[in-house]
Amino acid sequence: MAKLATLTCTACGAAHTKWSGRCDACGAWNTIVEEAPLSAGPSSKSLGAARGAAVALSDLSAHEDAPPRTACGIAEFDRVLGGGLVPASAILVGGDPGIGKSTLLLQAAAQFGAAGLKAVYISGEEATAQIRMRASRLGLADAPVRLGTETNLRNILTTLDAEKPDIAVIDSVQTMWLDTVDSAPGSVAQVRAAAHELTTYAKRKGISVVLVGHVTKEGQIAGPRVVEHMVDTVLYFEGERGHQFRILRAVKNRFGPADEIGVFEMTGSGLSEVANPSALFLGDRDTPAPGSVVFAGIEGTRPVLCEFQALVSPTPHSQPRRSVVGWDGGRLAMILAVLESRCGIPFAGLDVYLNVAGGLRITEPAADLAVAAALLSAREDNALPQDTVVFGEISLSGSLRPVSQSESRLKEARKLGFSRAIVPERSKAGAAPGMTVQTMPDLAALVGGVFGAG
């Protein structure tokens, strides 16, 4: 009797007896797909008798050399990769439409070609004439990069076999299709199969494959999440269209630190790297302003200073508005609740607007104290001194918790001309000579000691 096809969720792998729009196990929408059964073969009872090849095992104490790396010369790109490109690696780059993914990878391919690697750029979205126009605008018309336009993955792999490149850029994986998969390009099955074939090819042939991925309206890479598990490195290219800079963030990296960032500036001649991101994110801060607080954060291994801006105003509506750009809205609600219940600072009847200047997105809890200081500064119309940085985590009880890498944060702040810091107690702040460090035991001490509110 033939085996029936099964229905599984591409997000969590849960099996289902019938199709539905939402997975009951993980709650994801439109992720349940039909999978064909395994082809006929030896039964599970015969697998033990038909012995296969033994797997070579080794001890944990065995020593292996670190994988060789090739730097392309774009320091920010090399930083996010963990120090350079590793052979036989698969890299997935995602980002919003028009954010600059193709521009960045064309520049990187040209730099790798100049460094001695053979680079191939294959596009399924643009014609070679369009790519040449972009290369001419970027000043890369004579770059040693081989171009191709194709969507049939069988033809692409045949071309790579003939060319034998060191690095291949596939733009994009959602446009690739396999003639062995009976579905349209961009479907879950096609994306998963194409990513599997390209990743396996990279490991088997020892070349580096860079895949460009589209993103959904939620900002996730389109297609099954299993694609992110297949590859070695997942990079997100972030940025706001109204700002000139872009951030390349590593969310997964088997060959380097995760959550590392590289900062680029979009110019008329392409993307240029930013050597000092803190100076860019801080912008012009000539005079102190209420609601403006500088936060000393850590992005990957790099300390980065940015500015939180808050505005508190009376609301004409029955329901006050809470608007957040660049930070978690749920965490803002928590900070407001702690200020009201633990410190007696009400925000009822007030609209609250919070923004991270420059379009940077902050995710670490160490920004809690900077957000609270910005809210208090805006509400009391009392500006902090211009040379002050703030960082610390706030608990629900109103106490302040120390955060990691305090020395690096203060050292970066001192390098940029800041001479005063407000940090939680028990913070390791002894490695920043020349800084006046003011420690706070809890949020109430900040409210009364710095702003005189309460």
Image (cartoon, rainbow, N blue to C red):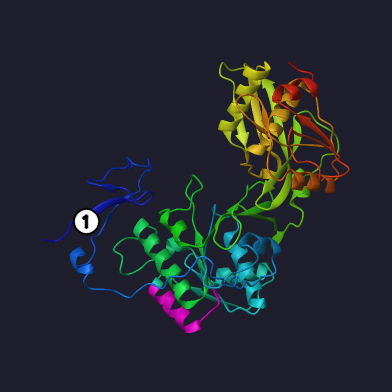
Where is residue 348 shown, x and y percent of the image? 62, 16
In this view, the residue in front, 320 or 304, is 304
Q: Is residue 6 above or below residue 357?
A: below
First to last magenta residue range: 154-167
Q: How many marks?
A: 1
Residue 142, visible in the rendered structure: no
In the picture, which quadrant includes the C terminus? top right
Horizontal relation, residue 329 to residue 11: left or right: right
Q: Quadrant of the N terminus?
A: bottom left
Q: Is residue 149 above or below residue 15?
A: below
Mark 1 — residue? 5
Residue 156 is inside the magenta segment: yes
Residue at image x 66%, y 61%? 79
Q: Main secondary structure of the magenta part?
A: helix
Left or right? Give the position of 140 relative to 233: right
Q: Quadrant of residue 282?
A: top right
Q: Looking at the rendering, which quadrant does residue 353 occupy?
A: top right
Query: Residue 16 in the image: x percent, y percent?
Result: 26, 46
Determine the residue positioned at 82% across, 39% down.
285
Whether the magenta-drawn stretch holds residue 202 is answered as: no
Q: Position of residue 283 (x, y in %)?
A: 78, 44
Residue 45 at x, y percent in the picture: 18, 65
